[in-house]
Image: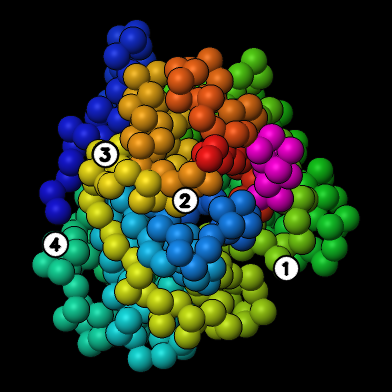
Amino acid sequence: MNIRGHEIDRAVLRSDAEPKSRILDRAFAFAFRGLVYAQIWEDPVVDMEALDIRPESHVVTIASGGCNVLSYLTADPARITAVDLNTAHVALGRLKQASVRHLPDYAAFRSFFAEADRDENLALYHRYVAPHLDDATRRYWEGRDLVGRRRIAGFGKGIYRRGLLGNFIGIAHLLAKLYRIDLHAVLEAETLEDQRRVFEEKLAPVFDRKFVRWLTDLPASLFGLGIPPAQYNALAGNRRMAEVLKARLEKLACGFPVQENYFAWQAFSRGYGKHADCPLPPYLEERNYRTVKARIDRIETRHANMTGFLMEQDENSVDRVVLLDAQDWMDDAQLTALWSAITRAARPGARVLFRTAAEPSLLPGRLPDAILSRWDYAERQSGDFTQRDRSSIYGGVHLYTLRA
């Protein structure tokens, strides 16, 4: 499972970009070869409603942090194929799957992935999980990161504080401390009205600070969110980035009760809540543990490019495709290749779900009409899914269905 650096470069580097932009692309491609997301930032509850997964469904999804792959099992698909170019994400997905299979009970599973900061997790890993990992995955987790820490030790120190996103959130917490802001105050609010008061009084003014506005005007400042330079431009549009981020943070802080939104806990506490009634992703909820364990063998994780994987599949063999926000990175030729592969592999009635940094779908005007005309865009439902996505960081959630 060697790092496929050239494939990540091909996915990120823009052939038509100016030299300065290509330098930024290369910097992001290098950063993206390590762990980016210890937790995925797409709402699986919205996903499962949009996808309408059936017992016969073959779901193909980009793996990312692996949370949604496991959560989709609660919808009872026939099988799930998770693909990713990122070595760390593939290793994380396989670690989670082996842990579901081999950890002794829910308490151990919760300790490992919900708490994710206990020393006893390392003993659980070595006793129950490590003997069942493939060699490449075990080498990854027992190897060392760029600063010399054993990667598996992250589950004893707080894995959600690591990776590009974890480091980005850590820097945000450091800035908050410098401005004497307690981000935990959002999580202590008892009502939506209290959450809004905290946001307006404490958080919103930060985005008017000159330093914050200058910092967020730099595309590299958002690498920690997994946002490459091409996606940065789509996200900003005609506004300054500080204004865009303020609006997205407002939705995260005020759009949903914190008692129901684990994304808010990740943002404002750098991990899931410790109490038994704190919100968790579906795969980590105790009520779903036996179901996920019983269905875990339906998942296959592949270190592969989505387009290449779909080209290898039989025609009319795929029912659901989840692209996350990967298309924001793509030029027109890459988009066309991807959707050609999807259209060939998809069964009539197949659904494709993806997210975009900006609000509108990026397909019109970029895909050839011969391909796009075969798909129906669920515009009204997509708007509803966008509003209800608790992660709050995307401008649009988009659903397409293949015509019969």
Q: Is residue 209 in sight in this rendering?
A: no
Q: Amino acid at mark 1?
A: Gln
Q: Using the numbered discs, state the Cα–Cα distance from disc 3 to disc 2 in whole angstroms.
A: 15 Å
Horizontal side of 199 relative to 122 (left or right) equals right
Q: Nearer the viewer, mark 1 or mark 2?
A: 2
* Residue 381 within the magenta-colored segment of the rendering: yes
Above or below, 40 relative to 122: above
| Element type where label 3 sits in the image | helix
Q: Mark 4 or mark 2: which is in front?
A: 2
Q: Quadrant of residue 236?
A: top right
Q: How many residues crowd mark 3 within 10 Å: few (<14), some (14–19), many (20+)?
A: some
In three-dimensional space, the C-alpha distance between marks 4 and 2, rounded to whole angstroms, equals 29 Å
Give the magenta-colored segment's residue range: 378-389
- Whether residue 20 is situated above or below residue 143 in the rendered picture: above
The numbered mark, 3 or 1, whose residue comes first in the sequence reads 1
Is 101 placed above or below 390 here? below
Q: Nearer the viewer, mark 4 or mark 3?
A: 3
Check disc 4 and report its element: helix, strand or loop.
helix
Q: According to the image, label 1 marks what residue?
A: 259
Residue 260 falls in image quadrant: bottom right
The x, y position of residue 71, in whole percent, is 50, 66
Identify the residue under disc 3: 311
Determine the CA span between mark 3 and mark 1. 43 Å
Q: Tag 2's secondary structure?
A: strand
Q: Earlier in the sequence, mark 1 or mark 2?
A: 1
Mark before the other along the chain sequence, 4 or 3: 4
Give neighbour class at mark 1: few <14, some 14-19, many 20+ (Cα, 10 Å). some
Residue at image mark 2:
320
Q: Camera-side residue: 28 or 395?
A: 395
Q: Earlier in the sequence, mark 3 or mark 2?
A: 3
Nearest to viewer (mark 1 / mark 4): 4
Residue identifier under label 4:
136
